[in-house]
Amino acid sequence: MVSIIGGTMFKQIYRFLSILLISNLFFSPAVLSNPQNNSKNSDISAKISQNKIKHKKTIKEIIFGCKKPVNQESANNQTPTIKKPTRNDQGYVTKYGVYYRDDIYNTYPQSDNK
Amino acid sequence: MFNKKVLHNVVWEITLKCNAKCLHCGSSAGDAREDELSTEDALNICDQLAEIGCRDVNLIGGELFLRPDWQKIIKRLTDNEVGVSIITNGIALTEDKIDFLADIKIKTLGISIDGGTPETHDHIRQVPGLFNKIFNIMEYVEKTNLDAIAITTLNKFNILELTQLREKLINSPFKAWQIQMASPHGRMKNDLCLSLFEYYISGLFFAKSRITVPMKQLAIICLHDFGYYSKVIPRHTSHSQWRGCSAGKGILGIRSDGKIQGCLSIYQDKFTEGDLRQQPLKEIWHSIKLCKWNKRLNRYLSLNGFCKKCEFGLVCLGGCSDIAYSLTGNVGENPQCYHAIESYWKKENPKNEFEENELKSSLLPQADCRQRLDGRLDRPETPFNADNQAGRLFTPASQEIFKAITQGSMDKFGIFYLKSGEKISGNFIENLNIEADSKKLLELII
């Protein structure tokens, strides 16, 4: 009896973790997104396959939170004189809103932040 | 995946009453709504915003200064440690108001500037003398610690004045320039909407301007209705990687009658998510039903036409919902997309996926118009015309140059080259056998 209950529970946990893993792979924007314009001449299908490779994560990362991929551009934007962005560069301002100057500065490459 | 939901930004229309009659106004502002929130209600909302941890609020109108209790609302928000920015048309902006805003330390003062010349700006705003008034009062703003940002809504009236406007702003106390697209709803007429040619060239103009104008002189940013995934146009938008509309995810809109929208620019009743007179904000914000239409899976399933076939579809989800909806009547199909334009003109024999999709669709779009890859806007009741091929509005020469531009590249100095390696210069444009307006447009990128 105990082994039957244990087996069912194990199955349910296994199913839950599988769904969690698959949905994370499919719907996590951090792993699916592509840079807007950094790869001028590269083939799009090649870029997609590269990103697919990036999707592979360790179980630890999946369960305890995904490690954000290093965004070269935003990494470049960080300089000691500029306050680090308090939000990611997705942009949380709608069409009827207005940006803060520092947030606009953070969209520029590092070389301009002088 | 299980990150705590954070309300980053709320755009709050505190009144719809307005003292201008802007030709592009998407809200058709003018008279106040019949049932606008009372002062007590508004202050209560300020407290609720703080309670759910809202970081920043943008107060807009109509014209916010026309609401008698605007100072109380700002004060309550700042007392609650919520960041406040405001957007004004500048008509009622006085030294007293500027002092108040500076003392209370609002984050940004956004002022609408819609033309490179007084004539154009005042015509769009329908307020004589406003352009000069704004630049006069800006001299006082400069003496304070306020961050003033010019906001331009791009349409057919002002696109050819972008260079003039940029120079004017560089030589003014404005520290930054935010640009957004006018979308055809409210008072904005369909024929004021940019064609895709104009849209694409304006993207190049802003990308070039960000390269050539020093950031500290004038920081330039285009909102997320410009994009997406271009292989040609360098970054000029708020996002380096567009990951789909934020409506209901990190942002909310509050109407002056207390109704909640995922994004205030998608104002139609079918996108109303709740009523603050009936429910607490916390309940609406944490409701699983909030912006169901914008959930990733729903958005993905609603993709249409080119967006449905697009390799970025799962991430992009059709770009800006407002633009997509106002141009096609569907949030899953956004013609104003650099990637769609570049893909289209890359073909030997361009074929319009948007039209192809419409042939298969038995449903008429719900918005006022549709925009096709040739930039045409059609009323939904207009029957599909098989002759309506892309590029029909341009001469073959214009089509050729447009095609070449969408496959070109911009170097690190902001100089644009065609795929053939030819540089876009004044002489090059002079020798083109194209319409005068197209030449003027191309001059934006030299």
Image (cartoon, coloured by chain):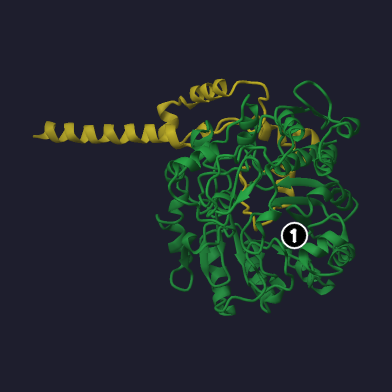
State which quadrant residue B12 falls in: bottom right
Q: Is residue B298 visible?
A: yes
Looking at the image, which residue is at 45% across and 68% down? B280
Of the pair B92 and B200, the residue shown nearer to us: B200
Name the amino acid type tagged 1: Gly
Name the residue rendered at 43%, 47% in the picture.
B362
Vertical comparison of A87 with B277: above or below:
above
Instruction: Give percent across and percent down for residue B383.
Output: 52, 49
Chain that appears green: B
Q: Residue at x 43, y 26 (%)?
A: A58
Residue B27 x, y percent position in the rendering: 63, 65
Dividing the picture into quadrants, the one containing residue B349 is top right
Q: Quarter of the image holding residue B428?
A: top right
Assign the C terminus of chain A to one quadrant of the image. top right
Seen in the image, is A81 located left or right of residue B72?
right
**Residue designated by label 1:** B110
Q: Is residue B132 left or right of residue B392?
A: right
Q: Residue at x 57, y 76 (%)?
A: B36
* In this rendering, position of residue B213 left or right of residue A37: right
Label 1: which secondary element = strand
Q: Nearer the viewer, residue A38 or B41?
A: A38
Above or below: residue B81 compared with residue B376:
below
Given residues B146 and B189, the one toward you in this image is B189
Question: Which of B426/B350 is in front?
Answer: B350
B306 sits to left or right of B125: left
Q: In this structure image, what is the colour of chain A?
A: yellow
Quarter that holds the N terminus of chain A: top left
- Residue B184 x/y as whole percent: 63, 56
Dot 1 surroundings within 10 Å: few (below 14), some, or many (20 or more)?
A: many
The vertical placement of B112 against B195, above or below, is below
Chain for numbered disc 1: B
The answer to whether any part of residue B315 appears in the image is no
